[in-house]
Image (cartoon, rainbow, N blue to C red):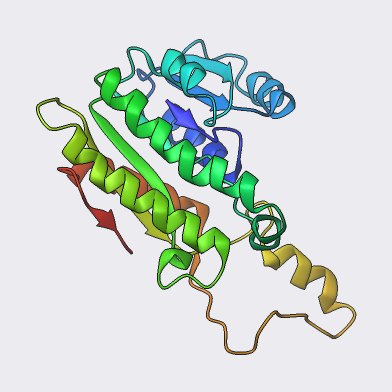
Amino acid sequence: LLTGGTGSFGTAFVERVVDDHPGATLRIFSRDELKQSEMQARFADRSDLRFFVGDVRNRSRLARAMQGADIVIHAAAMKQVPACEYNPFEAVQTNVLGAQHIVDAAIDNGVRKVVALSTDKAVNPVNLYGATKLCEEKLIIQGNAYASGSETILSCVRYGNVVGSRGSVVPLFRRQRDEGRLTITDERMTRFWITLAQAVDRVMYALEHSVGGEVFIP
């Protein structure tokens, strides 16, 4: 099961699974019905893709979609820093409560492995987005204690800004290039760039090597 399955990472992950693991059944879980229909059309010849409209905020829907799944990749999140600052309750419900629902549903359904996507902004966070992702990491990692006695193991992958993903600053800089002026938030900021392919590689690495409780960092 892949939450946030129609986002930038989700699309790249689906492509990798379709290419490298033709025998795997992949469930795409997201709240964007339009993008789901577009993905269905794109992979119309694949009968091993399942599509679930739902939100990680809805624990019962998530639990139903997760029934019988061996692996869960949790990529659903609110990721835009300004949007999280302006809509803090929404960010908490998706990034924090959503992570708790992942833990609960995975343990209750006997999922073998959970890998949740985090961010470099979880380190000493100065904005709400980073703070919610730090909470997500704590919830996922501590989920291993709640899963004691079951086969479920949970871990996180933490990486940086994905080049060219939805909301990435790169398309903005490309548009501003012709104007000769790039806008940045703060001259002191540091960005750690990673490609979508590298992001998928990190998750695949975590799936192969996790034993529960890790935060994998490139």
Q: Looking at the picture, how far across and down is residue 93, in whole percent?
A: 56, 41
The residue shown at (36%, 24%) is 105
Quarter of the picture containing the N terminus is top left
Q: Looking at the picture, how far across and down is residue 130, in whole percent?
A: 50, 62
Name the outermost residue toward the front: 89
The residue shown at (74%, 25%) is 34
Name the outermost residue toward the left: 149
In the displayed structure, would residue 131 be above or below residue 214?
below
The residue shown at (64%, 62%) is 81
Q: In the drawing, does residue 94 fall left or right of residue 37?
A: left
Q: In the drawing, does residue 138 fall left or right of residue 97?
A: left
Q: Is residue 31 visible?
A: yes
Q: In the drawing, does residue 187 fall left or right of residue 120?
A: right
Q: Looking at the picture, how far across and down is residue 41, in whole percent?
A: 68, 19
The residue shown at (24%, 20%) is 110
Q: In the drawing, does residue 65 fall left or right of residue 113?
A: right
Q: Closest to the observer: 129 or 18?
A: 129
Q: Residue 113 occupies which quadrant of the picture?
A: top left
Q: Residue 21 occupies which quadrant of the picture?
A: top left
Q: Looking at the picture, how far across and down is residue 27, in whole percent?
A: 47, 20
